[in-house]
Image: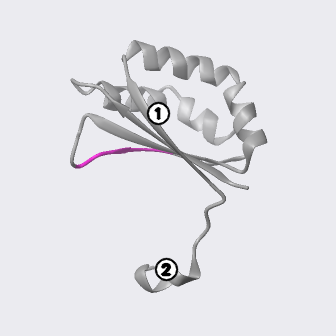
Amino acid sequence: MAITINVRYTETGGQARAFAREMASSGTVSMIREEPGNLRYEYYVSLEDPETVLLVDSWTGQDALDAHHASPVMERIARLRDQYDLHMSVERFEGLADNPADERFIRR
């Protein structure tokens, strides 16, 4: 069952955006995307609150997510979170798929 985790990083002075930029420029994002079972790892900046960055992180299942959490890259992420003094909120979604009833609302 696929798992998607939304992580909202917040801080003042552009720290959340700087964290996301460093994650990308250091190659950490690329390494995570190459991990077995990773489906998506993308950062977005809020239009309403530029001090908030959203990470959409999806995995094929709990085993893949557990392996990611046990990987050395998590130590780097934790250090960067501390360095940028980020605050986080997390939402977890499991087994979501397109619902045919929603199709009429989706423009492809």
Name the outermost residue toward the bottom: 104
* Residue at 51% over, 14% down: 79
For label 2, the crowd category at 10 Å Cα-Cα, with few meaning under 14, some 14 to 19 and many 20 or more, is few
Residue 59's disc is none
- Give, as a single range, the part of the protein colored magenta: 42-47
Magenta-drawn stretch contains 46: yes
The structure residue drawn at horizontal position 53% and vertical position 19%, both measured from the top left corner, is: 78
Residue 104 vertical position relative to residue 38 in the rendered view, above or below: below
Q: Which residue does the numbered mark 2 point to in the structure image?
A: 102
Looking at the rendered image, the quarter that the C terminus falls into is: bottom left
Which labelled disc corresponds to residue 24?
1
Q: Nearer the viewer, residue 34 or 65?
A: 65
- The image position of residue 96, as x and y in percent, is 61, 62
The amino acid pointed to by label 1 is: Ala
* Nearer the camera: disc 2 or disc 1: 2
Q: Position of residue 39 (x, y in %)?
A: 64, 51
Where residue 57 sits, quadrant-wise, is: top right
| Of residues 58 and 27, the one drawn nearer to the viewer in this rendering | 58
Q: Main secondary structure of the magenta part?
A: strand
